[in-house]
Amino acid sequence: MRETSGNPSASADETPAAAAQPLLVYDGDCGFCGYWARYWQKLTGDRVDYRPYQEVGARYPAIATAEFQRAVQFIAPDGRRASGAEASFLALSHAPGRGVWLALYRNLPGFAFVSERAYAFVAAHRPAFFRLSLLLWGRNREPPRYDLVAFLFLRLFGLIYLAAFVSFAVRAEGLIGSRGILPLTELVDAVAFRLGPERFFLVPMAFWLNDSDVAIQAVCWAGAALSLLLTVNVSPRLSLVLLYALYLSLFYAGQVFMSFQWDSFLLETGFLALILSVARAPGIWLLRWLLFRFMFMSGVVKLLSGDPNWRNLSALSYHFLTQPLPTPLAWYAAELPQGLLKFATGGTFFIELFLPFLIFCPRRPRFVAAFGILLLQICIFLTGNYNWFNLQTMLLCLPLFDDAALRRIVPRRLSELAPARAEHRATRRAGRVVVAAVAMLIVFCSLVRMDERLGHSPPAAAQAVAGFIEPLQIVSAYGLFAVMTTNRREIVIEGSYDGAEWREYEFRYKPGDVARAPRWNIPHQPRLDWQMWFAALDDPWRLRWFSRFLQRLLENEPTVTALLEKNPFADKPPTYVRAQFYVYAYATGEEKARGRWWDRQLLGLYFPEVHVRGE
């Protein structure tokens, strides 16, 4: 501690007798000083006394009035004092978790110099910084608390997990069951042969113990049960550990049907939710970092792709038609004026590229980021079926708020269910060290993945670290709709007994019958319907699952046909199946009024006839 003059040792006779607690003296006529003194007092509680110099200055004749007016003065119980930035950090060191600033001041070369210069600049422009403080934090600033935020986040995240597990459970047998399209048993045998003992780390899943259909259903429904326990706040930490492990098992077992970004997104959020349940502050900041990466990289990849439709702002002129599973409202969105759609495309860039940086800003700008992201996600939610994806992204906006903001809108009875901070058992030092290490590892590896996504090549050591934890799926690269498709191609599968008369198979959610309106499926994820959309953009001979799917249709396998809306061969298996290729477009307003939602034109054969062996 030092004197105002800069002398590192102050003589005891310059101050009155030792006080019972430290004292921070500020200028009571300065609105900026009073604003921050009141806030620091809320942080430190009764561990530090705060008084204006107009009230106590006479007790310290060794400190000139000009010194009180120039900078805050921290006076320790033993009489030693400091001013300026050091005094501020000394006061804050009495608040839980704020001692790092004093440690940096005393131990990091150059930090003290920069801090004092910054303090002097702010002090010279107090009126401006007072107005800025009011703008950024509001008039009655409170220390942020996140007990209610964490409580609601974990309860609602339990519902997200529930949707994911149940959605896969009801389709798992047809997708990866023993008679499904890509049987799990085949994956287990192939990976065990190829990787040997390394498989337990490179492909971590519970199915190494048992890969039967019963085991698949057990994992799915156990996940659903644990999701409900998390939602009702029963053993939340244990539930989060098991939920993460079970969904990671399904992630690998699901193969191509679990290859979507939202599955990695769910796993990463689930891991961070576990950290949140252990340590509030690291959990909140890591969730904010995840939301930043997800949103910002979604905008970056659109620019890096070089797609002219994004660069000339025409992308949304196609999106509402060509997206995987449109909702009924997508037809109306596609009919909006081109000027409005271009404006909306520009707005998407603004929300994805600029608003994410407000996530790390003070309270009010952070709220602006949250509302902007929520607006975008609501628009996507209304016009496209993205299962729980948008719901989870909206939920990630919750940590951008604090308890004080939520208590204004959350019913009082619900907010009272959140445990108070005092009721939380403090994390032990070893636990804090582990959480800090894991947090730094996540941030480091996510920066590596972002750098790779930007087209760079990080150092080999950094890639090795990121690659080492990759099997755990706790850090992923994100980026949505980098390239906009400009027409909608659909695969229509047909079957026949004689090769002359063909009947169409109808899927539950993807477009087929031109008279059928698009359907809502949120929060369900119809994984076969989604894969059919991707298949239309790919070479069918590269898609192992597609030919297996056709084979199962020839066999009339009930677990696979149950994935469809209509099986035209329910009584007897077809002799032939084939896949036709169509281009789909929205019907005109007049056609829609007559009950037609789509127009389609045959492009040709997507996959040639497959027939029963021996025919």
Image: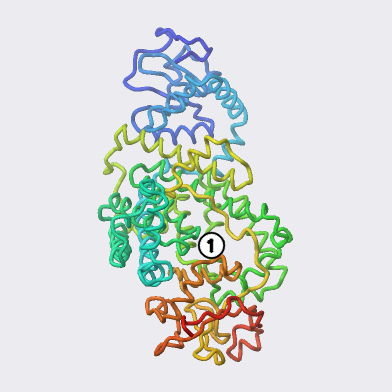
Instruction: Identify the residue shown where x is 53% and y is 12%.
Output: 5
**Residue 500 location, x and y as percent?**
57, 92
Q: Nearer the viewer, residue 162 or 425?
A: 162
**Callout 1: helix, strand or loop?**
helix
**Residue 169 location, x and y as percent?**
35, 68
Judge whether residue 565 can be spotted in this image. yes
For this orientation, the residue located farthest to the front is 614
Judge whether residue 276 can be spotted in this image. no
Question: Which image quadrant is residue 70 in?
Answer: top right
Instruction: Identify the residue shown where x is 30% and y is 37%.
Output: 427
Task: Tell me the amino acid under the disc marked 1.
Answer: Gln
Viewed as shown, does residue 384 lie left or right of 230? right
Viewed as shown, does residue 414 lie left or right of 340? left
Q: Nearer the viewer, residue 260 or 268?
A: 260
Question: Which image quadrant is residue 164 in?
Answer: bottom left
Q: Nearer the viewer, residue 549 or 408?
A: 549
**Residue 569 location, x and y as percent?**
44, 88
Q: Which residue is mark 1?
A: 377
Residue 82 versus residue 552 in the image, above or below: above
Within 10 angstroms of label 1, few (less than 14), some, or many (20 or more) residues? some
Instruction: Identify the residue shown where x is 44% and y is 36%.
Output: 39
**Residue 559 location, x and y as percent?**
37, 76
Viewport quadrant of the N terminus: top left
Instruction: Identify the residue shown where x is 41% and y is 87%.
Output: 570
